[in-house]
Amino acid sequence: MPQDAAQTIYLADYAPFTHTVEQVHLTFRLAPGATRVLSRISFAPTPNAPAGPFFLHGEQLNLISARIDGAPVTPEVTATGLTCPVPDGPFTWEAEVEISPETNTALEGLYMSRSMYCTQCEAEGFRKITFYPDRPDVMAPFTVRIESDLPVLLSNGNPTGNGDGWAEWTDPWPKPAYLFALVAGELVNHADRFTTASGRDVELNIWVRPGDEHKCAFGMDALKRSMQWDEEVYGREYDLDVFNIVAVDDFNMGAMENKGLNIFNSSAVLASPETSTDANFERIEGIIAHEYFHNWTGNRITCRDWFQLCLKEGLTVFRDQQFTGDMRSHAVKRIEDVLMLRGRQFREDNGPLAHPVRPESFVEINNFYTATVYEKGAEVIGMLKRLVGDDAYYQALDLYFDRHDGQACTIEDWLKVFEDTTGRDLSQFKRWYAQAGTPRVRVDEAWSPGPKGGTYTLHLRQTTPPTPGQPDKEPLVIPVAVGLLSPNGDEVVPTQVLEFTEVSQAFKFEGLASRPVPSILRGFSAPVILERQSSADERAFLLAHDTDPFNKWEAGRGLAKDVLSRTIAGKPAPTASFVDALHAMAADTRLDPAFRALALRLPAQDDMAQTLFDSGLTPDPLQIYSALRHLRETIAAQMGGLLADLYDEMAVPGPYRPDAEDSGRRSLRQAALSYLTLIDGGARARTQFAGADNMTEQLGALSCLLDIGAADTALADFRTQWQNDRLVMDKWFGLQVSLAPPDTAAVRANALTEDRDFDWKNPNRFRAVIGGLAMNPAGFHDPSGASYALVTDWLIRLDPVNPQTTARMSTAFETWKRYDADRQGMIRENLERLAATPGLSRDTTEMVSRILAA
Ligand code: ARG
Ligand code: ZN
């Protein structure tokens, strides 16, 4: 065994820490290669805590000195922390350590992004800053003194003093160490104010590098709308005098909710019409809201241990989804969320990395910030709300905030507030947190006419396939929202929620004049795969008549998938009825343009691969690519007139605005353009590219040109125009890889890794190129195996520099068992090569071994 053999941590082993922390004082003397961190921490024994040695986490720290109650001590230091004999009662711990932010390329702990200092502590980064009980159930108030000549010095809480070369911050709210943050640099602020419902005047700032000031206005507006929304909808107010957001160029994730000092990947906060697309604006609005909402769901009430991660993440994602729905369109947001759930979470849940929403063990917690914990975690909250109803949901949330403010909680605490307010027994519902895998719901139906009207019966059967470590599954509580339509298209039974709890269960609807057409799983009321035989005619009928916007969209999607699957299988396909239905929908001016744009978008390649695999087939990425191409050409040829009209009608007059209405029109126009480009040789796209005054239209045109292999000039012009804007250049790098023709994708990606602007240590740039290749399924799975090898080479290179991003990107291979023996063989070879890399990080080792174990 290697010396630091990876240890598995189990939920079942939870035990409280031996001590509580009453107060933390930190002093930072910043220097790039040798920062000194002085800590003074008051500890007291935890009443009734299990006996054990006093242990503080600490990694990569150079301990200069330590004292207990003022007397020097010599702790025993290992690679993961220290132990030390301590007094029986309360005592004060002091330590001085030295760390090196400038060589910290893992971007965890205190590190540098160019000349700026910043931190990322969630989940376990604080132990790279000083010795501490780095676990979320240890909460304490912090004061922080920063000493540096840099002009802007920030930490959590309120500013409580500053002078020449120093600043002091006090955070009165007890918090776990993962919410600690520090920023120091030459930064400028975009300032504003917000007055809370009870009259607290809050100073708001977005801090950026000079030159980015003009990209802050939208984020600030989104922040103020988030603050107001949380007051109105959840009754939650902000609780400090300042709220700071900082944009950082080098960041592993999207953003981080540190108390009073949110730190953002610059791609998740900076926006301007010229440099950001509509999709960027919507994402930024959602992430600003998400991090802000964490102040209550995450910070004031935090997690007892990291197994409970979904307690804060699932709930906060659910809240940011509600917010975006309120700001924009609930129907459109729901479809977008389901696309993302199916694209990322179903893929995870049906492969070797499947794990429960609340995992029971892990090696590296950073590997569990997943679509399952976040997105399926949010679906579980949505189901709970659907089952208990809106009023009961908000009553339970009020009790949650009352009862648990200031605590570190569990899923049991969360469910208990629902049980206490509604009287429901949620023990079966709790299985959603424990069982991995996407449930299948099979639907059979029966109709029996009668003198007083007929009876329609829905027979539902549920199964959840085995997942790693979980061969057998028990039935779940599945809320199935159903409505019934009469054959002439009227809704005869409005939406009701069936509580489906048995393996097999029948639901009857009586007194119906004629056999109805069912609309099942309205609003995607549960994260399951619905298995039901449905004809093309019935799908076309629902597409035309369903009153539920999600299922209306879903009917079109089902038709598209039928056409594609049958084409791939060489069978006759209902292409004509699909194109007719699509035409009717696209031309229906009663429908929101954003909705029509979504309906015009065909299933993604990876979604089709998963769909084929689910139906027992071995997907061929090239066949999927060609079938999609062929269908797009058919649509373009048959709907060209309508699409050309839409392209002209949906032009948005006046200055650019990122709101739902204008962005909806632009998205419909873009959908039209993407088809038209297949028949006009790129004429419209070239004109649009040359005349665009916003990034949505410029990038939209560029992707159409890339799609027909006619983008060389546009790519060169784009680069000339944007070479000094890193975020725009990420798009330039990413798009040409993700849209490269299958047989040239690896070559293109490889060439870009040799580009003078390929800064591979920057996660955004690395993801653009290497992640872009993985997001080009036909190119990634090119039969030569060139892409597999290229991605693996780069993962091997990045791992020692940035394990977290490497491990995350290894999920490119998580679907390998879907494919044929040749592809599986090549992937296995590459995964084994990666696994055999000497010194491979714990993060990547865990991921690769789970993927290989499939
Ligand atoms: N809590 C952050 C968010 O949801 C994500 C932090 C992820 N950090 C990590 N090391 N995995 O917004
Ligand atoms: Zn979060």
Image (tube, rainbow, N blue to C red):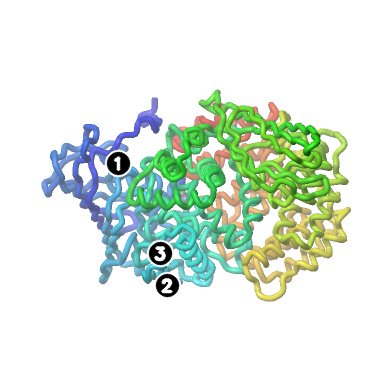
Reading the image, the residue beneath label 3 is 244
How far across and how far down the image is residue 66, in percent? Answer: 18, 46
Q: Is residue 629 above or below residue 225?
A: above
How far across and how far down the image is residue 350, in percent? Answer: 61, 33
Left or right: 102 with respect to 433? Answer: left
Reading the image, the residue beneath label 1 is 57
Viewer-nearest of labels 2 and 1?
A: 2
Residue 143's quadrant in the figure? bottom left
Q: Amino acid at mark 1?
A: His
Kindly check if marks 3 and 2 are in contact, taking CB atoms under 8 A apart as contact. no
> Element at badge 2?
strand
Q: Amino acid at mark 2?
A: Arg
Name the residue rendered at 39%, 64% in the picture: 243
Viewer-nearest of labels 3 and 2?
A: 2
Reading the image, the residue beneath label 2 is 193
Tell me the crowding category of disc 2: few under 14, some 14 to 19, or many 20 or more residues within 10 angstroms, Cα based: some
Mark closer to the chain start, 2 or 1: 1
The reply to whether the residue tagged 2 has its Cβ within 8 angstroms of ligand 1 is no
How far across and how far down the image is residue 308, in percent? Answer: 42, 41
Name the residue rendered at 58%, 35% in the picture: 349
In the depicted view, which residue is nearer to us: 768 or 566?
566
Q: Amino acid at mark 3?
A: Asn
Q: Which residue is outermost to the bottom?
A: 654
Residue 797 in sight from this viewpoint? no
The reply to whether the residue tagged 1 has its Cβ within 8 angstroms of ligand 1 is no
Viewer-nearest of labels 1 and 3?
A: 3
In the depicted view, which residue is nearer to us: 359 or 634?
359
